[in-house]
Amino acid sequence: MINMLRSEHLKYKRTFCRKLFFIVPMYVLLNLPFMNMYFFINTLNLWSCFIMPFMISLICALSVLREKRAGNYRTLKSKDINLKKMWISKILIVTYYEFLASIVFLSIMLLVKLIYKTSLIHPKELLIATFVIFITTLILIPICLFLAEIFGTFAPILITLIGAIAGTIFATKSTWYLCPFSIAPRLMCPIIKVHPSGIPLEIGSPLLNSSVISKGFIISITLFIILSVITSFWFSKRRN
């Protein structure tokens, strides 16, 4: 498994995919001259609703496209390769780069907070929000890889576009946990106290209920593991 992870990691060397995980968070710095406190808070909202999901979908799409163009899949049958482990390694490497992107994003947000010297959001809340977004978007990795394998490069991007819009709508519903794209924005509500649409929440709003955080965590991690295992079995059967 370690060798597969190393092999998968090497595939990202000197590729746009690898750079993308560091380029995307930099958009915060580009907007620094125009930033105000409203934009600062909503950057976390945008990161959870749109930016992170789209980054994951694009990376997964490009990863599958690279494999197909390289013709690697055609040689799998002639080699003694555990396809389940190969699929899991793909998921774990994307997870690794998503984590690095989250660290870069958090560092930039802390820098911006230091520059503006604002007490609007505590560093602890920034850390929690970034970590929550990272965990609750993991479920999108096996989904996007699966869609890219089945339907092609643009499928995960298109589904993410639809899902991101639907996610902001379902995030305020009692059934928010049924939509993978609504989990992250729903959990942001009690943390940054902002509606998924970007409007500050009023005191007493039911969306401020923090009990959803533990529920969302459990759902996200459980589904991430289940979908990773299921899609790994699918991948091994499809390639055999």
Image (spheres, rainbow, N blue to C red):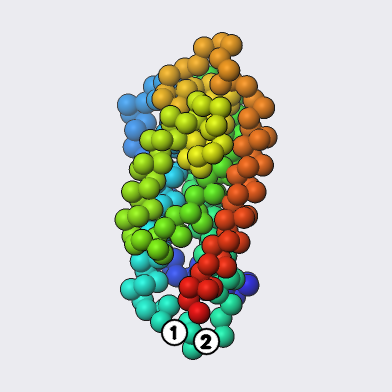
Quarter assignment of residue 127? top right
Local SS, label 2: loop
Q: Is residue 151 above or below residue 37?
A: below
Q: Is residue 179 left or right of residue 85?
A: left
CB contact under 8 Å: marks 2 and 1: yes
Asked whether the viewer can see residue 35, the reply is: yes
Quarter assignment of residue 230? bottom right
Task: Out of 19 and 230, give the one closest to the viewer.
Answer: 230
Local SS, label 1: helix
| Neighbourhood count class around disc 1 (C-alpha, 10 Å): few under 14, some 14–19, many 20 upward | few
Q: State the residue lying farthest toward the bottom.
A: 78
Task: Out of 152 and 86, give the one closest to the viewer.
Answer: 152
Q: Is residue 162 above or below residue 99?
A: above
- C-alpha gap between disc 2 and disc 1: 7 Å
Task: Out of 99 and 53, give the one closest to the viewer.
Answer: 53
Instruction: Locate residue 181, reporting x and y percent.
Output: 47, 40
Instruction: Locate residue 162, reporting x and y percent.
Output: 36, 41
| Neighbourhood count class around disc 2 (C-alpha, 10 Å): few under 14, some 14–19, many 20 upward | few
Q: Which residue is mark 2?
A: 79
Instruction: Locate residue 210, reporting x and y percent.
Output: 64, 25
Task: Name which residue type carries label 2.
Answer: Lys
Q: Which residue is mark 1?
A: 75
Q: Residue at x 49, y 50 (%)?
A: 140
Q: State the residue lying farthest toward the top.
A: 203
Task: Out of 1 and 182, give the one closest to the viewer.
Answer: 182
Q: Is residue 169 left or right of residue 3?
A: left
What is the count of numbered marks?
A: 2
Task: Name which residue type carries label 1.
Answer: Thr
Q: Residue at x 67, y 35 (%)?
A: 214
Q: Residue at x 54, y 73 (%)?
A: 236
Q: Is residue 146 above or below residue 171?
A: below
Instruction: Locate residue 171, reporting x and y percent.
Output: 50, 30
